[in-house]
Image (cartoon, rainbow, N blue to C red):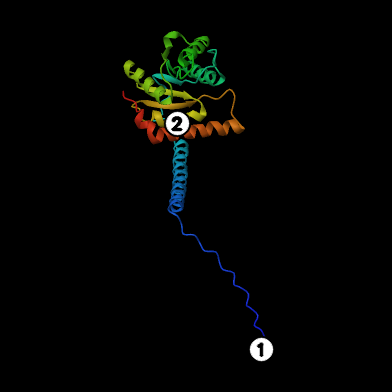
Amino acid sequence: MRVPSVPSPLRKQAPRRRPATRRGRVGRARLRVRTVLILAGVGLATVILGWAALARAFAPHGNTTAGRFDTLIVLGTPPDADGNPRPAMLSRVDEGVKEYERGVAPRMILTGGLDGHRYREAEVMARVARSRGVPSSAIVIEPNANDTIQNACFSARIMREHGWRSAEVIANPIQLSRAGLIFSRLPIDWRAHVAPPMEPLSGPSLVYWNLLEVLKTARYLVYANRTEACSL
């Protein structure tokens, strides 16, 4: 007797892979290119910021050991909206007055322009210096600089016009390293001097201002030292 054959179960067929369309291939290629560009950009930014951080760490703070100078240079910082000096400005001017009274230099250049504000930094600083007893004859106002590069350049031009060859540069601790990089390119004898802050930074504020200075230093190293080079 013949046993009826049992039909074997049907094999489940694997789904056929669709051939890649031209649009899909182009999309994947663009994604790969975009990924490579992002990684390259992150790597380049890391290198530049690392360079800036090292430059700040090893920035020169002078090129002379002299104790007396032809002039002081006090770098500006903005006043408040009413033209009154902020603590950052007061600390710099007060330190300049102390150095003047110590006989470090017979005069001071106060440098700073509008920089988007209503009041010129140098003029507000001069008002503070006079209120501290510095005579107008010992104050030179440089009212046009809008950044540290111009502070240095315009002050150096004033020095050249008067035949002054040396200066003590007064700035806050965070700005001083970048200022040192800038002044090191000028043909003058100089020394940096820290103005102790009236309101020391700490916590997030300290991190923010240090990071901002690293970014400004990176900008200076990458292109500003050439595009905004000082011509004396």
Could you tell me which residue is drawn at 32 percent across and 19 percent down? 160
What kind of element bears circle 1?
loop
In the image, residue 134 lies at what x, y percent? 48, 11
Q: In the image, which disc is placed on residue 204?
A: none
Q: Residue beneath label 2, please?
A: 178
How many badges with numbers are in the image? 2
**Going by the image, does 211 lie left or right of 105?**
right
**Can you say whether 130 is above or below 71 in the image?**
above
Image quadrant containing the C terminus: top left
Residue topped by disc 1: 2
- The quarter holding residue 166 reads top left
Q: Is residue 105 visible?
A: yes
Q: Amino acid at mark 1?
A: Arg
Give me the C-alpha separation between circle 1 and circle 2: 101 Å
Q: Are marks 1 and 2 in contact (CB under 8 Å)?
A: no
Earlier sequence position, callout 1 versus callout 2: 1
Residue situated in front as seen by the camera: 22 or 38: 22
137 left or right of 204 in image: left
Picture coordinates of residue 117, whole percent (x, y): 49, 17
In the image, what residue type sits under mark 2?
Arg
In the shown orientation, is residue 84 left or right of residue 185? right
Binning the other alpha carbons within 10 Å of mark 2 as few (below 14), some (14 to 19) or many (20 upward) gives many
Callout 1: few (<14), some (14-19), or many (20+) C-alpha neighbours within 10 Å?
A: few
Indicate the position of residue 37 as horizontal and vertical percent values: 44, 46
Pick whichever, 201 or 23, lies toward us. Answer: 23
As displayed, is residue 100 above or below residue 230? above
